Amino acid sequence: MKRLQTDYIDLYQIHWPNPVIPLEETVLALETLVKKGHVKFVGVCNFSLRQLKDVQAISTLPIVSLQTEYNLLERSVEHDLLPYCEENQITLIAYTPLNSGTIVKNEKNSGILLNLSKKYQKTISQIILNFLISHPSVTAIPATTNPTHLKENAQSTDFVLEKNDKDLLAKTFTPHIAKINTTKIEVTAMEDHTAYSTLEEARQNKLNFFPSPQMLSEDIKKGDFLKPVKVRRIKKEDSVFAYELVNGRIRYWAWVMAFGDDKPIPAIIEE
């Protein structure tokens, strides 16, 4: 609060489920902060539906927000989390709503977005953001350090996409989630060594990821798998792998720890 130069925080969220500390202890701390007037509202980030229900059952305060990844290429929340949030007056805060600018890389997809951009006289980013916030319970938090982009992002709220255009976007960007044998996915080493390329590295967790792949594997065994990993087809005919892992290394290794090679992993195949 001193750094923010304020005497209260509007919204204080649990960034990630912590399997080491009892949830009751964390909730009690949040309730104490609210009672003291330091915090107005509390929420959670990166919680599965089961975990969200668990914290609701414990807390005497309403859980007002769930922050999670949501964009045109990552729409897993629409299956369970988003409907639940809508039914229970919980704001879903969409992070990475523009998927770090990769949504328009596909020529067909970029063409559709460009046509809508011309129709509404809005930027492609504004079209994408407006699609997300067309859900009444969704607010998006695109990151930018560019003042022009900041203004554009704010102006994504001042128009309404027609239903047929929303339906077009929903149909176009419906990802196909495949079940892929983990042995068919190549995990390459990162040049900057900021991620694990082997199961042993993931087990050791020397980079101190939290939750660790091992911790995450325990949640996966309970049915908590927040979103599919992303893979890309390998075009080399002599490769023993069919795909390369593009995104989701911690989830990938946690899945392998949970099920070995016996259970295919949910994956979105990027074209």
Image (cartoon, rainbow, N blue to C red):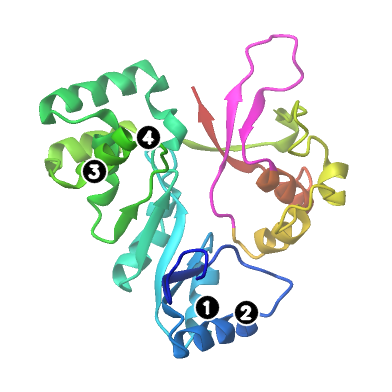
Residue type (three-letter) at the residue carrying disc 4: Asn
Q: Earlier in the sequence, mark 3 or mark 2?
A: 2
Residue 234 is a magenta residue: yes
249 or 258: nearer the viewer: 249
Q: Residue at x 42, y 76 (%)?
A: 8
Query: Closer to the N terminus: mark 2 or mark 1?
Result: 2
Q: Is residue 43 left or right of residue 24?
A: left
Q: Residue furthest top?
A: 237
Q: Which residue is mark 3?
A: 130
For marks 2 and 4, give the CA distance. Answer: 38 Å
> Which residue is drawn at the image coordinates 85% and 48% (left, top)?
206
| First of labels 3, 1 by sequence position | 1
| Residue ID at (37%, 53%) | 78
- Disc 4: which residue: 146
Image quarter of residue 173: top left
Q: Which mark is residue 23?
A: 2
Which of disc 1 and disc 4 is earlier in sequence?
A: 1
Q: In the rendered image of this protein, does residue 19 appear above or below residue 204?
A: below
Q: Which mark is residue 201?
A: none
Of badges 2 and 4, the one in the foreground is 4
Residue at which label 1 appears: 55
Which of marks 3 and 4 precedes in the sequence? 3
Name which residue lies at 40% across and 81% down: 62
Q: Quadrant of residue 183?
A: top right
Q: Position of residue 243 (x, y in %)?
A: 65, 25
Q: Estimate the spatial distance between the alpha carbons at disc 2 and disc 1, rounded to whole Å.
A: 7 Å
